[in-house]
Amino acid sequence: MNLLATEIVAQRVFNPLYIWLDTAFLVCLCLLLILRKKYLTFLWGIAGGILYMVVDYGIFHLLTHSRSIEGGDLFWVLLWMSMSYGITNFVWIWLWFSKDKHLVEWSLLIVVWWIAAPMLANTFGQGLTPIKIQRTTGAYHGYMALILIAGYAAAIVYNLFQKDKTKRFPLLWMLAIGILVQFAWEFSLLIGGIRSAEIADWGQKITTLVVNSLLETNLGAVPIYCIYALVTAKFTETLKRRKQPVTFTGRMQELNAARVRG
């Protein structure tokens, strides 16, 4: 069976309390970033939330009509979902690309919350009517695949003609991050009883997990890396201009030389 050609139903069923708990976590995460003077990472996370809303509400709902909801207002639920996973995903990817010296701590904060939040909501939100929201993927997965292949193909061709190994795209690192971030999110939703909660077929549950992990965040790995390299070649995390700005390839050279945890 061709999993990528299968109609995927990305469904979530969750307690309304989950929204409020997660909103509080997002505020705390943003405050931590600001207190740690990671202003650039914070702004990138906000940009991610806005982008997710444009895609989720503007494209998935208004354009393809692939979104449906029961038990809640579609606009406001999508706004929360977009800001939630837009902020956390984009912040996490930015921290991975920067090889932040506290990458382990930031990663655990996000992943542990993803695992714990559904359990907290189910325990302390008993009696509340659950919200079910879902989307089908047949109308746009081909476009996602086009973005995926375009990004990686461009990076591969560049590497083939770049003689200096220190200035090449770290393709395996980018691929691992692109898959890992989405997988952690999807897996946490699955074991938390949110993803595919009313779908009994475990084959379909796993298919959703695998396909989304390979495609949905990974398609942005190359563009996000390029944006990160271009921006940080000129600016620091505190939004100040670098004393010694570098070129795009020069920044790639710096990033390739860096190691996780300093």
Image: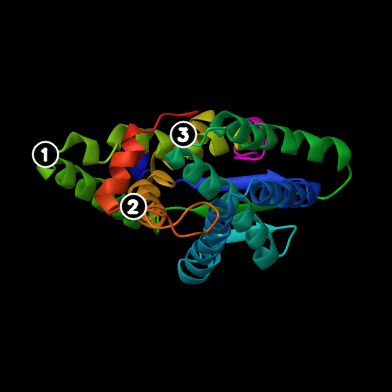
User: At which x and y percent is residue 121?
Assistant: 80, 40
**What is the distance, in whole Å, between disc 2 and disc 1 at their CAs?**
19 Å
Q: Residues within 10 Å of mark 2 (few under 14, many from 20)?
A: some
Q: How many marks?
A: 3
Query: Circle 1 sits in a helix, a strand or a loop, which is it?
Result: loop
User: Please, is residue 258 above or below residue 36 in the view?
Assistant: above
Labels 3 and 1: the sequence-earlier one? 1
Tell me the amino acid under the disc marked 2.
Answer: Cys
Which residue was labeled with disc 3? Answer: 180
Residue 67 in view in this figure: yes
User: At which x and y percent is residue 217?
Assistant: 44, 46
Labels 2 and 1: the sequence-earlier one? 1
Asked if the residue at tag 1 contacts the one at tag 2, i.e. Cβ–Cβ closer than 8 Å, the answer is no
Whether residue 193 appears in magenta in the rendering, the answer is: yes
Q: Residue at x 23, y 41 (%)?
A: 167
Please indicate whether residue 206 sits to the left or right of residue 170 in the image.
right
Q: Residues within 10 Å of mark 3 (few under 14, many from 20)?
A: some
Q: Residue at x 53, y 55 (%)?
A: 40
Which residue was labeled with disc 1? Answer: 163
Q: Main secondary structure of the magenta part?
A: loop
Q: Residues within 10 Å of mark 1 (few under 14, many from 20)?
A: few
Query: Circle 3 sits in a helix, a strand or a loop, which is it?
Result: helix
| Residue 226: mark | 2
Q: Nearer the viewer, residue 211 or 231?
A: 231
Residue 168 in view in this figure: no
User: At which x and y percent is residue 30?
Assistant: 67, 51
Labels 3 and 2: the sequence-earlier one? 3
Q: Nearer the viewer, residue 89 or 135?
A: 89
Q: Nearer the viewer, residue 260 or 223?
A: 260
Query: Circle 2 sits in a helix, a strand or a loop, which is it?
Result: helix
Residue span colored magenta = 191-200
User: Please, is residue 73 above or below residue 177 in the view?
Assistant: below
